[in-house]
């Protein structure tokens, strides 16, 4: 019988004293904690005081009234983050400076207290109980040397479970990584989806049967990618959704693998219409909007993430009553225009990785010298296949997969997009950067 996510009991204990999770009691807790957060923010943050000034002193009478409050976008975190801060600088335990890939503006800056960080460690510890057992070793392919970094927080949380946690850092060479995993007998792997896919495709023979579970985090993980890793390593793969703005921890899959169960004691999640910013019901797609509960350093109230997703109902096949979020992998501004169409790195990945001998991919888009000239998509691909004949055949298969893509295919067939393919190694692909993005080279005189 499938076990419910361990988040049920944890959230019930925090919000209404334990027992089975009661959604009505949870909503009462969320409303009470939300009103405390609103009062705290208005009293201590010049930014929130200015935007929430008309809020009644008694607060909201229903969670539905949250939709009447204005949306908060990321611009304030770039231009005047100290205006959002509700505490003195001396009470800040961690400052995160976050530059969005491709952005030329000021980076976002977020502040966290020790208590804010402790809530994240609690969430990690509870969520990881469905993946790791006492005595197991986990290897984390994210930064861990800095205090309160992802690897450091995971180390603290797994220590509570009497498990060992080794922070490797971002992956470099797949063969070297596989050697380290086997040397330390690491049974649980945690890292970025693209990097773990490269590892699974390049080192499946070495690792298959030695891994019990994988946690994908740090960027969007489509279901096809999770299934590919699970099949190659013969293990269970879980997906986590979290942002720096959520305090790193946001939601995590259960054994049903259909949506991320949210840390509802700390977060309220809405899905809103991207235009009107009005909430949408469960099952409808829109923009993910966050409101933090219990956060004292820098509360976020109706913060528009730019991520696309939808909420699912509370009746999960695992038996849980915790709300589920299904991120959809699209982000405001992450698509690039080519003539009358748009595409993203996700579309490239979905086509390229249909060829199962491809282990890694980096992509660069170069526009033509004029808007009417074809753009060129340059792919750097890694494979274990050797010899010119093998790579020639693989290149043909990649081109065929690209042409069959419902998004990229029409651009290729209309000669608006050319595809160039070069061959490299998995290590060189990983060296291009841990978080992958579509590199843009603009050669046009005017766009």
Image (spheres, helix red, strand yellow):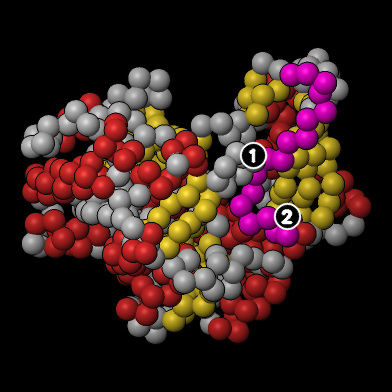
Where residue 371 sits, quadrant-wise, is: top right
**Image mark for residue 104:** 1
Q: Residues within 10 Å of mark 1 (few under 14, many from 20)?
A: few
Number of labels in the image equals 2
Residue 44 visible in the current orientation: yes
Q: List the single residue furthest toward the right.
A: 388
Q: What element carries label 2?
A: loop
| Residue name at image x 43 percent, y 75 percent | 155
Place of residue 76 in the rendered image (x, y in percent of width and height, measured from the top left): 44, 38
Q: Say whether residue 404 is magenta.
A: no
Discs 1/2, front: 1
125 and 421: which is toward the camera? 125
215 and 375: which is toward the camera? 375
Please name the predominant secondary structure of the magenta segment in the image: loop
Q: Name the residue under label 2.
A: 432
Q: What stretch is highlighted in magenta?
A: 429-447
Place of residue 229 in the rendered image (x, y in percent of width and height, measured from the top left): 55, 58
Above or below, comparing residue 115 to residue 415 in the picture = below
Q: Residues within 10 Å of mark 2 (few under 14, many from 20)?
A: few
Place of residue 166 in the rendered image (x, y in percent of width and height, measured from the top left): 51, 78
| Residue name at image x 27 percent, y 55 percent | 296
Q: Is mark 1 on a helix, strand or loop?
A: loop
Where residue 301 sits, quadrant-wise, is: top left
Q: Earlier in the sequence, mark 1 or mark 2?
A: 1
29 and 405: which is toward the camera? 29
Q: Say whether residue 445 is magenta.
A: yes
CA gap between label 1 and label 2 equals 19 Å
Residue 318 visible in the current orientation: no
């Amino acid at each position: 019988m499938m076990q419910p996510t361990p988040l049920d009991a944890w959230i019930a204990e925090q919000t209404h004293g334990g027992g089975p999770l009661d959604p009505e009691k949870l909503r009462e807790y969320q409303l009470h904690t939300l009103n405390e957060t609103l009062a705290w923010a208005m009293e201590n943050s010049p930014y929130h005081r200015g935007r929430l000034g008309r809020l009644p002193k008694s607060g909201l009478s229903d969670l539905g009234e949250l939709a009447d409050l204005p949306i908060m976008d990321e611009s304030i975190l770039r231009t005047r983050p100290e205006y959002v801060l509700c505490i003195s600088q001396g009470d800040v335990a961690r400052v995160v400076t976050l530059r969005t890939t491709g952005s030329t503006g000021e980076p976002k800056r977020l502040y966290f207290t020790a208590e804010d960080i402790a809530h994240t460690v609690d969430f990690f510890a509870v969520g990881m109980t469905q993946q790791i057992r006492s005595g197991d070793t986990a290897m984390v392919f994210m930064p861990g040397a800095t205090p309160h970094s992802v690897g450091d927080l995971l180390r603290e949380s797994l220590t509570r479970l009497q498990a060992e946690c080794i922070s490797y850092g971002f992956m470099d060479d797949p063969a070297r990584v596989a050697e380290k995993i086997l040397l330390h007998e690491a049974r649980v792997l945690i890292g970025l989806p693209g990097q773990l896919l490269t590892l699974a495709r390049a080192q499946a023979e070495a690792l298959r049967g030695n891994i019990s579970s994988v946690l994908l985090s740090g960027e969007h993980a489509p279901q096809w990618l999770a299934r590919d890793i699970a099949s190659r390593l013969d293990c269970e793969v879980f997906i986590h959704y979290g942002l720096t703005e959520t305090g790193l921890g946001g939601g995590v899959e259960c054994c049903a693998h259909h949506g991320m169960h949210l840390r509802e004691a700390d977060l309220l999640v809405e899905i809103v219409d991207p235009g009107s910013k009005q909430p949408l019901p469960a099952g409808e797609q829109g923009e993910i909007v966050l409101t933090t509960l219990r956060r004292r350093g820098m509360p976020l109230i109706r913060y528009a993430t730019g991520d696309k997703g939808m909420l699912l109902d509370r009746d999960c096949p695992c038996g849980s009553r915790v709300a589920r979020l299904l991120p959809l992998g699209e982000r405001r501004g992450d698509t690039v225009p080519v003539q009358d169409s748009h595409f993203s790195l996700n579309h490239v990945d979905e086509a390229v990785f249909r060829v199962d001998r491809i282990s890694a991919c980096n992509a660069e888009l170069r526009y033509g010298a004029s808007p009417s000239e074809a753009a060129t998509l340059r792919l750097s691909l890694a494979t274990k296949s050797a010899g010119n004949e093998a790579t020639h055949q693989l290149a043909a298969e990649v081109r065929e997969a690209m042409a069959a893509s419902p998004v990229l295919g029409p651009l290729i067939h209309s000669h608006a997009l050319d595809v160039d393919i070069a061959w490299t190694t998995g290590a060189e692909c990983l060296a291009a950067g841990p978080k992958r993005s579509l590199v843009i080279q603009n050669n046009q005189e005017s766009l």
